[in-house]
Amino acid sequence: QEQADEEAKTGIKPAPLKFRKAIGHVAGTPVIARTDLWPMLSYLDANFTLAVWTSAKLRTARLLIQMLFPPDIAQRLLFVWGQNKCDAKTVNVNDAAADSADEDDDNGGKKDDDVMDNAVKYLPKGADGDSINTDTIFGKNLGRIWGMY
């Protein structure tokens, strides 16, 4: 309908939208790979040590890696961490303060708790526009990596 409205206003027929096809499904969600994914991963692999740390469940992360990464790069990943390595914080969105303190940590950045509290502002809203009562935010404390590697 939007395209028809645009054509009626301008007299110009817009080009049809082209979407990439899903290469598979993981956790009930279609996986749509970027067209330049393998060249990008090859460049990164040639110049950096790669790892994956996601807030997804570990099983989901492994399935996505199997589906999206060239096998030789997937085998060289330093680690694959999932939700179990994240700091989970369940928040009551309706009670959470929108602003958090800007107190710095020893590294000159915001403290992890402050960053996670501030993220509450971006949690999804319900159909009525009100905040959903609770949600879980998964934070990644980079100090965990620096301490291990």
Image (cartoon, rainbow, N blue to C red):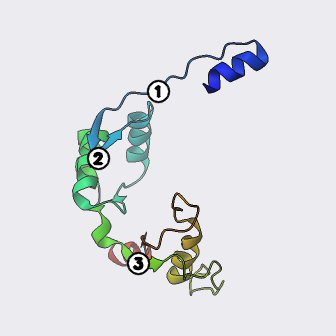
Q: Nearer the viewer, mark 3 or mark 2?
A: 3
Which amino acid, by three-letter code, is at mark 1?
Phe
Q: In the picture, which quadrant includes the C terminus? A: bottom left
Q: On the picture, is 69 further left or further right than 107?
A: left
Q: Are marks 2 and 1 in contact (CB under 8 Å)?
A: no
Residue type at tag 2: Leu
- Give the crowd class for mark 1: few <14, some 14-19, many >=20 residues within 10 Å: few
Question: In percent of the image, x 47 and y 73: which residue is there?
Answer: 133
The image shows residue 70, relative to residue 147, as above or below, that is above
Secondary-structure class at tag 2: helix
The answer to whether 99 appears left or right of 93 in the picture is right
Which mark sits nearer the N-terminus, 3 or 2?
Answer: 2
Residue at the spot of label 2: 64
Residue at 69% in and 22% down: 5
Quadrant of the image for the N terminus?
A: top right
> Horizontally, is 35 left or right of 74 in the view?
right
Residue occupying the far right of the picture: 10
Tell me which amino acid carries mark 3: Thr
Disc nearer the start of the sequence (2/1): 1
Label drawn at residue 19? 1
- Which residue is denoted by mark 3 in the rendering? 90
